[in-house]
Amino acid sequence: MLIVGLVMNAVRAIIVRGALTPERYRGPAIFVVLALAVIVGTIVSLGAGDTVVALMDDGPLSVGGTLLVLTATQIGLLAVAGGLVVAPRALAGLRLVPPSGLLRSIGLGLGLAVPAWVAATVLAYVTSLLLQAVGFHEATGPIDSALNRADPTVILVSFLFVAPVAEEYFFRGVVYNAWERERGATVAIFGSAALFAAIHTSLFSLVPIFVLGVVLAVLFQRTRSLPATMALHAGFNAISVVLALLARQGILTLPT
């Protein structure tokens, strides 16, 4: 019933808002699009239910199942954005690649990855101390278990390619531009960052990921280059993944 209701709401919005000028956002409400994307991602992850159990119980992991678990949400984001925003041309005329300076914008994104990672790590540490002080304790989830045990190739593909492409396309490509057209740049920057943080479903990482989302949104606003935000996102993830893999091999000891 929920899925049918959300789909009907989305279709109705496309029909009604289709009469707006091309400069407006002519698609479904962003919250409806995100809800459907999460549902699709959840359905996709059901195809790897055994892997989810194995991740939680330290059981054997399959390559295909792990890849599906780590990319299910991103698959949902791409599928729903494609069907409800791109196909009906809800963001007509949108350019996600700058007419010039593409390589420079990508270099800027990569260059910002290190300071963004350092800032997010500091914020994550402070947030963790504050939450633990009031009685919250971070539980180990499937993602943490996958970083510790999954095939490194699967981890690299998921975090360095699939996540940056899919999440930037959705949150900066769709959410930011839809809200910028309808509500202005300020709402677009902070709103897209808030949804970006919420989709990661971790209280302990909520603040650092929100701040990262703001940086990504501002970078897109300044460069109008989605490849630039993908580069920053990929570079940010690469630092975390490399450190996790080094710790996993006993080469590096990470603070807890």
Image (tube, rainbow, N blue to C red):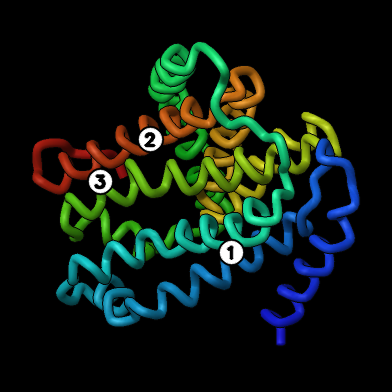
- Mark 2 or mark 3: which comes first in sequence? 3
Amino acid found under the numbered disc labelled 3: Leu
Residue 83 visible in image: yes
Residue farthest along the left direction in this orientation? 250
Q: Residue 167: horizontal and vertical position, in percent? A: 51, 47
Name the residue that disc number 1 marks.
37
Residue identified by numbered label 2: 234
Q: Tell me where residue 224 appears, x and y as whole percent.
A: 61, 24
Q: In front here: 80 or 62?
A: 80
Q: Is residue 248 left or right of residue 225?
A: left
Q: Earlier in the sequence, mark 1 or mark 2?
A: 1
Q: Quadrant of the C terminus?
A: top left
Q: Quadrant of residue 164?
A: top left
When asked about the image quadrant of residue 12, the answer is bottom right
Q: Is residue 75 left or right of residue 127?
A: left
Mark 3 highlights which residue? 156
Tell me residue 180's x, y (percent).
78, 35
At mark 1, the secondary structure is helix
| Residue 202 in sight in this render | no
- Residues marked 2 and 3 touching at CB (< 8 Å): no
Around disc 3, counting alpha carbons within 10 Å, would you say few (fewer than 14), some (14 to 19), or many (20 or more)? some
**For mark 2, does the 10 Å Cα neighbourhood hold few (<14), some (14 to 19), or many (20 or more) residues?**
many
Dot 1 amino acid type:
Ala
Q: Earlier in the sequence, mark 3 or mark 1?
A: 1
Above or below, comparing residue 91 to residue 230 in the picture: below
Q: CA distance from mark 3 to mark 1?
A: 23 Å
- Please tell me whether residue 6 is drawn above or below residue 254 in the rendered image: below
Q: The N terminus is located in which quarter? A: bottom right
